[in-house]
Amino acid sequence: MAVIAIGVVLVMALSWKLYQLAKAPEDSPLRAVTLCVACVGTAFPLGPRAGAQAFDSLAGPGCAKLLQNVLLLAAAYWLMCFYLYSVSDRRSGRSRARWEALPLAVAVATISLAVLTTPASVREHVYETQDMSVHQVAIFYLIAGLYLVYAIASALRWTWRYARMATRPLATGLWLAAAGMAGMVAVCSVRAAFVVIRWRGSPIPHGLTQIVNLLLLLATLLFMIGVSYPGVVTRIAALRIWWRHHRLYRRLQPLWTLLHKAYPEDALNRVPVSRWTYHPSVRGVHRRYYRRVIECRDGLVRISPYLADLGAHDVGQRSPAAFAEHLRTQGGFKV
């Protein structure tokens, strides 16, 4: 269940970030976050045994494990780059990102060499069943784990700092992401300690390893929720505004129709209204709503000299449609 939930969250987070990046391709911090989420999303299918076996059958034993770890290291690097681009100017951020790429390159080269020099029969095992007495295997897991601890801990320090200064909903998302990263740092540290213990020949209980793996999945899920939370809250708020404008747009239809017939020269758009243009599009509802409000306002300004004759209380109790119909039947203005 946790695996399915993480997969759904990853797909939603990646789709949202790609949509944002398409609207602002020059935004370096956004591009870094998108690449981070893309790396995590690409690495995720390689984690379950079925996905790893399918990839290994095509590329060779151990390739799924190597690619998954390379993608996770790259995701941690792009997470660091997000903060480097955010806290520095563009030139300085790029310079620091290039320097941070050196430890990544060393880690990727080391784990790749470790996998290539490991016998094929040993590569097929997963973390729980690996023989850590084989030096290449121990080095592979230890180097990958230590780099993840370094990169995620660096990002966690910046996330904690900005979460204390931010306001909601950004602060809530940052705190959730920080909690997820803190969990990932703790779990990766424990896994690195397990590697050293097993390297020295001492066993680790299988149940304890399973608990650590579950905690890593939950920490990753919490991190992805934190990354997506501010955008989701903003979209929900925008959807509420859209629905309110859409509803008011429809309620103004009777009044607008009568005023438009009486004063067609006040129309901001001279295109005839039909049943196809009556319903505003998703992207154009705000523009159509404000246009209708302005046109109704202009029409009401024109008939304002007649309002005194109707009585303020009587007008206030009428709906827009009834008020417009009353004006028409009373001859307040010519339709």
Image (cartoon, rainbow, N blue to C red):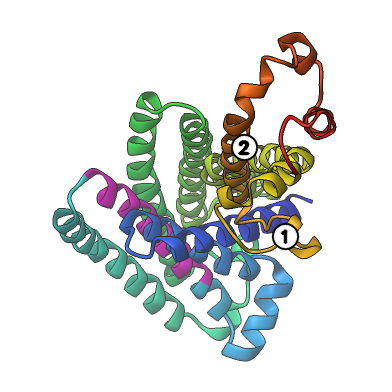
- Give residue 155's position: percent from left, percent from top: 36, 44
Residue drawn at x 56%, y 69% as measured from the top left:
42
Between circles 2 and 1, the one closer to the viewer is: 2
- Give residue 142's position: percent from left, percent from top: 42, 58
Residue drawn at x 59%, y 33% as measured from the top left:
302
Image quadrant assignment for residue 75: bottom left
Q: Is residue 63 left or right of residue 99?
A: right
Name the main secondary structure of what is drawn in magenta. helix
Q: Which residue is mark 2?
A: 299
Q: Report whether residue 162 is seen.
A: yes
Q: Which residue is mark 1?
A: 273
- Give residue 179's position: percent from left, percent from top: 51, 34
Q: Is residue 260 left or right of residue 18?
A: right
Image quadrant assignment for residue 241: top right
The amino acid on which the numbered mark 2 sits, given as a three-letter code, is Gly
Disc 1 packing (10 Å; few <14; some 14–19; many ≥20): few
User: In this orientation, which residue lies closer to the viewer: 119 or 172?
Assistant: 172
SS for callout 2: helix
Number of numbered discs visible in the structure rendering: 2
SS for callout 1: loop
Taking the magenta stretch, the answer to whether it contains residue 79 is: yes
Q: Which residues are magenta?
A: 68-87
Residue 20 versus residue 108 in the image, above or below: above
User: In this orientation, which residue lies closer to the viewer: 183 or 11?
Assistant: 11
Taking the magenta stretch, the answer to whether it contains residue 19 is: no
The amino acid on which the numbered mark 1 sits, given as a three-letter code, is Val
In primary-sequence order, the first of circles 2 and 1 is 1
Q: Is residue 310 left or right of residue 119?
A: right
Q: Report whether residue 207 is seen.
A: no
